[in-house]
Image (tube, coloured by chain):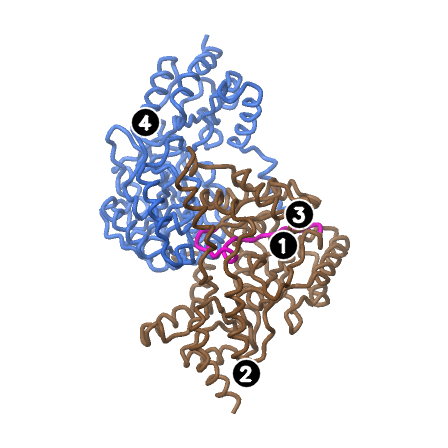
Chain colours: A brown, B blue
Amino acid sequence: MTIAKKIETILTGASWIRRMFEEGAELKKKHGPENVYDFSLGNPNLPPPAKFEEVLKELVGSEPIGAHAYMPNTGYPEVCSAVAEFLAREQAAPVEGTDVIMTCGAAGALNIALKTLLDPGDEVLTPVPCFVEYGFYADNHGGLLKTAPSWPDFQLDLTALAAALTPKTKVVLINSPNNPTGAVYSAESLKSLGALLEAKSKEFNRVIYMISDEPYRKVVYDGIAVPSIFTAYRESLIVTSYSKDISIPGERIGFVAVNPRASHRKALLGGMALANRILGFVNAPALMQRAVARLQGEKTDIGAYRRKRDLLCDGLAAMGYAFVKPAGTFYLFPRSPIPDDVEFVQALKAERVLVVPGSGFHGPGHFRIAFCVEDDVIRNAMGGFEKAIRKYRK
Amino acid sequence: MTIAKKIETILTGASWIRRMFEEGAELKKKHGPENVYDFSLGNPNLPPPAKFEEVLKELVGSEPIGAHAYMPNTGYPEVCSAVAEFLAREQAAPVEGTDVIMTCGAAGALNIALKTLLDPGDEVLTPVPCFVEYGFYADNHGGLLKTAPSWPDFQLDLTALAAALTPKTKVVLINSPNNPTGAVYSAESLKSLGALLEAKSKEFNRVIYMISDEPYRKVVYDGIAVPSIFTAYRESLIVTSYSKDISIPGERIGFVAVNPRASHRKALLGGMALANRILGFVNAPALMQRAVARLQGEKTDIGAYRRKRDLLCDGLAAMGYAFVKPAGTFYLFPRSPIPDDVEFVQALKAERVLVVPGSGFHGPGHFRIAFCVEDDVIRNAMGGFEKAIRKYRK
């Protein structure tokens, strides 16, 4: 036994995204990177908004003393206040600066929230398909990820969720706009989910929290509005980052906010401030905190992502691929033309098109295309997409 | 039950540093911040070296495309290589870029190392006094912190360590230069520790790892050299940050490096890359990675810390305080004039002098003075230090 058994097991097991990444690297070496169409990673390809560079230059040109020193574990109070002010409008709720904790991205935010909430054996319920890391995050803190199916259009299936709630459920974790499906949950379904959790909290005599993981909130199309979480359910938390909307995922900056109407607001915030410290995050990166405080509401060129989405959707629809057009995110989650999504992904790989099997997201029979790539990658991949589907639909 | 029991327990329990912080804030409100002498926090008060600002300005003035995008979980390969090149000289070992993983500070580094190494119930042994967070870090990953006393001069007590090693010990965690004592372990004692761990690994038929937590390596005085860890013991890891030596703790940038001669080098590195991802760190902040790559070997004005140390030590020695003069760090860990360090810290507080009881560091009968403060704070606190010791030594 050289390292922890759990880590060894994960390392030797199948991580689809990682496997695709490695096989992709091989393919690129063989054929040249320009001849491999890589849709495997959700790494935003659009630059940050121009204002981001301006703000950064201003900040590093006029550094006050202690600009890179420790600050409270929750972040600079003035940064939390700027975030809260924007969030209060967005959520139509009286969010204050003290309801916000700045974090190392949404992943950091979700981990400090789960550390604060989960007792050993507690369940985290999530509708699937879902982001591949949720299982790890729950397990990090002694919890267990449970899943419930969504409708075929990837909207919330309240009946399935109700059936999956148990006396061990501590958290219902949703992600809208959704990775990998691009679905945006309707206001009605969120209210119904809120009512369900309220009823079940009473029935089980414990608070069931709703955590909304929403780094794609601003990456939406066709004028769609992402509904307020804080008005849908009282016992709720929002975790998010600036990774996708302003294209700075490498900087690890995001936050967690507690619904100001939450019954245990103070315990939640105190617990998460502590968790931020003892999990080793300590605080969100200082300079980027000061940057995003001045970039509230800013976003990259979402129209460009819409153009990529339409280019991809129009092309694939014409070939006979079946999918739900995503209302947000930069992911498309088509049905695999054959039930075995892993086989179909291999067929695409034979055409030098890299995507991720839906099985990796608890969504077998589908595959994920991350279309945060150059338009030409989409155009040039069309031949491969066509050949692959023809192979199975003669 | 509103939040996790464990978190609730910690929150309601005694965190000395936090309690001092809160009581200190009260005192400052009452007397004015300039009349409270706050030595409670290890927050470097010296500015970063001038080159840091220069490098930052250059970097944000010439951002390449994708400068803030995701990179490998281990960090930019060129940054890891720059770190490795410096480390190879410092450690006199053939460290390569792939032996280094960039992290969110030393706290992030230590957490991914422990996540990678610990099976449930595994023990982490550390000499005490020690950094207050180690217990939390071990517990985060199912481990248990065990302690062994040091000699009265805070050097390693090999006999005590040998007695505390058990078949469950997976990690021996050392911190030199040490927080809170300022001790720097000698090359001889590190070699003896290496030999002890080698023998015990054989005896117990499992690898016992040495983790050296060394963010204060460059904060040393009087020409003292901090010995190489990688030459002292083969199965070793170094975790560190740029927080203290270049005064940027708020930016959360550090690294973990694996001894290139470690038996399971590849498994350790693969495991920690995975742990960096699934614990929610994902990667070290991008811009700061690129900055520190160009600041290898740089440090803040260590001479100023030495001046503060001498000012403090000379003053306290004249009053009859007993202490070991620290060879490094910006901490002094004097003996409390009475056995009850908490009572003595309260006596200092009555003089508006804020320090932390040694009990908070598994070092009862002592107290910690963080002298990373303005010289005048040290000078102005002298009266209070004198009154407090006189109260008990009439």
Looking at the rendered image, the disc whose residue lies closer to the viewer, 2 or 1, is 2
Where is mark 2, residue-wise? A318
The image quadrant of residue A135 is bottom right
Disc 2/disc 1 C-alpha distance (Å): 38 Å
- Residue B188 vs residue B12: left or right? left
**Can residue B227 be seen in this snapshot?**
yes
Where is mark 1, residue-wise? A211
Q: Are marks 3 and 1 in contact (CB under 8 Å)?
A: no
Looking at the rendered image, the disc whose residue lies closer to the viewer, 2 or 3, is 2
Q: Is residue A356 above or below residue A5?
A: below
- Judge if badges 3 and 1 mark residues of a common chain: yes
The residue at the point 35 percent across, 23 percent down is B308
The residue at the point 46 percent across, 31 percent down is B41
Q: Are marks 2 and 3 in contact (CB under 8 Å)?
A: no
Disc 2/disc 4 C-alpha distance (Å): 71 Å
| Picture quarter with the N terminus of chain A | bottom left
Q: Nearer the viewer, residue B342 or A361?
A: A361
The residue at the point 44 percent across, 17 percent down is B381
The residue at the point 37 percent across, 31 percent down is B46
Where is mark 4, residue-wise? B304
For badge 1, the amino acid type reads: Ile
How packed mark 4 is, by other alpha carbons closer than 10 Å (few <14, some 14-19, many 20 or more), is some
